[in-house]
Image (spheres, coloured by chain):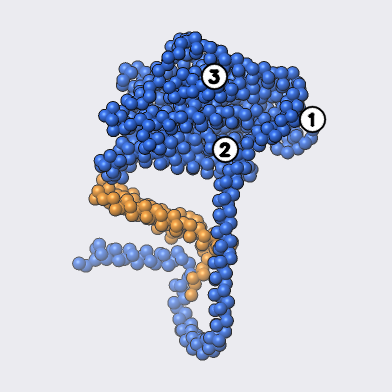
Amino acid sequence: MNFLDLIWLIPLFPAAGFVINGLLGKKMPKPAVATIAAGAVLIAFIFSLGAVYQLSQLPVEGRSHNVVLYHWIDAGPAHTQSGEVERFAVDWGFLLDPLSSVMVLVVTGIGFLIHVYSAGYMYEEDGFYRFFAYLNLFMFSMLTLILGNNYVMMFVGWEGVGLCSYLLIGYYFLKRSAGDAAKKAFVVNRVGDWGFSIGIFMVFMTVGSLQFTEVSERIHEGAAAGHFQAGSLWFTMMALALFVGATGKSAQIPLYVWLPDAMEGPTPVSALIHAATMVTAGVYMVTRSNFIFQLAPAAMAVVAVVGVLTALMAATIGIVQNDIKRVLAYSTVSQLGYMFLALGVGAFSAGVFHLMTHAFFKALLFLGSGSVIHALHHEQDMRNMGGLKNKIPITFFTMAIGTLAIAGTPGLAGFFSKDEILWRSFSSEHGHVLLWAVGALVAGITAFYMFRLLFMTFFGEYRGGHDSHSHGHGHGHGHGAHAIHESPRTMTIPLIVLAVGSIVSGYIGMPAWLGTNVFEHWLEPVLEPVPGAVVEVSHYSHGVEIGMAAVSVAVAFLGFFIAYTTYYKKSDRAERVATQFKGLYTTLLNKYYIDELYDALFVNRAKGAGRGLWRFDSKIVDGVVNGSSWATVRSAVGSGWWDRWIVDGLVRFIGGFIKTSSWPVRLIETGYTQNYALVMILGVLIFVGYVLWGTP
Amino acid sequence: MVPTSYYLILSAALFTIGVIGVLTRRNIMIILMSIELMMNAVNINLIAFSDRLQQVTGQVFAIFVITVAAAEAAVGLGIVIAMFKNKETMNINEIDLMKW
């Protein structure tokens, strides 16, 4: 079978699953719903594997396979910036090249595992079929985003995943906080989408096409011919507009605020959408547009700085959070910051590499946290956990592997990708030693808060179930420690597979001093340097690279050590530090007051504007109306008399006369709009019939 | 290239479904939705002829129709809500204010 020509089928399998489950799922038994949903993704995964395998068999220059199904939009001619006239035409087409093949494997592979996991995790929930229908719809949108061969299809998928994110965050829509979080995610993402759409229009204005390979070719040619200069204002603006889109979807400063709140959704959703796949769409989009960013060094610097600041900010917030999922959410924001740091210093392949390894270990950590929450019957506060390591051993071991991986332990996936990013942020032409230093600091903080999570959850004494207060709220089960049990096999097997992935997936991107970087080599055809752009050349020896890797590992170990002495050794240091630096602690606990700042700057402004308009309406407009009505009432008294006696007398007389004589007409005047409409349409039909077949 | 007649048949079918919906359904919401259906049938007509005649005018007009449809939906829903507040019903059979 030629899978390469069948890549258009890949998004359609989950789409079919969505249709089946969405329409019929309510009446189907739960296992059937889960089988259809997971099976659809599994078939998509198999087709992706086949297609990527066949792509890898092609010669390097030919590794870009385009399948156009039909012409989708043909809106007619438009002027491009250079004054030429191009047709604004978009195909419904699919593109499989090294970059999209990495993404499609990550999305379908990890997506399948999470579908399997959800079958166990969501079994008790109401609206089981709805959940799986949304998940499949998400897979369809995400695969459209990835496999689309042009910016418009990417935008369709982009909006589709945004919609599914909204639907799934608000899955428990009876809970007010879930509804609010869903709305917040939706609105914040719209801001980013605005930037993205501006960027798309600018791309069309620049090159007169939106198809990725064509845009890439034309920009390469234009740069070689000197039409496009690196660093020109136009390209900087274009890159920044696209980046605004990426900050929305990928939760970067200033639009990251929605992601932590998105944890209101069910945990598998957090793993699939808000850790492994959707939030990496921004990284994918920037990498896809690397030819634009290469010509905009200033925008690249913005990307790198925003990335590293996001990484630092989110990591510091993560230190003090007590909700297990929120820690992971801030960790995700922080790791996404790493990816953008990589993109910003021109190390696109390192960014995508971290995207892939992060997908493994962050999905693992989220699913593991879901398993903990499942075992504790919806307890999410780590202060009420502890001592779970022997009660749920599989969850513990897999989560420990995930923690080791994200902390950058040498030999696990996170080490290779994070180290690659840190090294490039120092050695690249776009890099800077400060970027490296902050990045390394974040690595230490990451190790600290992740081990804090591990120790608080799995070690020490079990702290839940003692005080009635802790399980008085929530779902009111009131289970004590005795009810804690390991999750079913549908949940633990995905955990184990992801744990294996978190160990081995790093070895395809080893640094130069250890072996060959297969991953970077694989992505090379997509990331060709644009003529005139600053090209990255490393003039540091392997020794420097090893030394810097050692430093970042040491910093991470320091983070682990502090967490170990603070949370494993049962010291009171955490409380002491919290009281000593009370201001800093409350600032972190309140997430730097960013939500409050946005409320004050934008949300309350919008609300205030609405209230002001309402006040204008109720005071001025209504006042004018009421005033004129008062005047009318006064003046009407006089004319009322005349009206009542003279005019009405006459009218009543005529009316009474007609009323008594017109009883047959009343029978057809029923007052039902539909009757009138029916007569109208019959009349139209008679006229049309007359025109068509009547006498000439 | 899809023949224009296909679009027209689709459009006519949609329009007819819309008309039947308006005439036969009793729920105001469904009637509003049927009206939307008719509008979009018109849109398909416009786009089909725009494509056939290679003129953008039809597409521009379709966008106007979409805009008007949005406004109409807003106004229509407003009326429905006001109606519901008064009558506490969505059944059009119980709304006969236009009688005599």
Tell me the subunit letter for badge 2: A
**Of residues A383 and A553, the one drawn nearer to the viewer in this rendering:** A553
Which badge, 2 or 3, is on the more N-terminal residue? Answer: 2
> Residue A29, relative to residue B33: is it above or below?
above
A307 vs A589, left or right, is left
Local packing at callout 3 (Cα closer than 10 Å; few below 14, some 14-19, many 20+) is many
Mark seen at residue A257? 2
Chain identifier, blue in the render: A
Tell me the subunit letter for badge 1: A
Alpha carbon separation for disc pair 2 and 3: 25 Å
Which badge, 2 or 1, is on the more N-terminal residue? Answer: 2
Tell me the subunit letter for badge 3: A
Residue wearing tag 3: A414
Identify the element where label 3 is drawn. Answer: helix
Q: Residue at x 58, y 64 (%)?
A: A618
Task: Locate residue A257: give its quadrant.
Answer: top right
Q: Residue at x 65, y 28 (%)?
A: A319
Q: What residue occupies the far left of the structure in this picture?
A: A696
- Residue A32 position, x and y percent, is 53, 32
**Of residues A396 and A189, the one drawn nearer to the viewer in this rendering:** A189
Q: Determine if residue B83 is in view.
A: yes
Q: Amino acid at mark 2?
A: Val
Alpha carbon separation for disc pair 3 and 1: 38 Å
Q: Determine if residue A483 is in view.
A: no
Q: Amino acid at mark 3?
A: Gly
Chain identifier, orange in the render: B
Q: Are marks 2 and 1 on the same chain?
A: yes
- Residue A587 position, x and y percent, is 66, 35
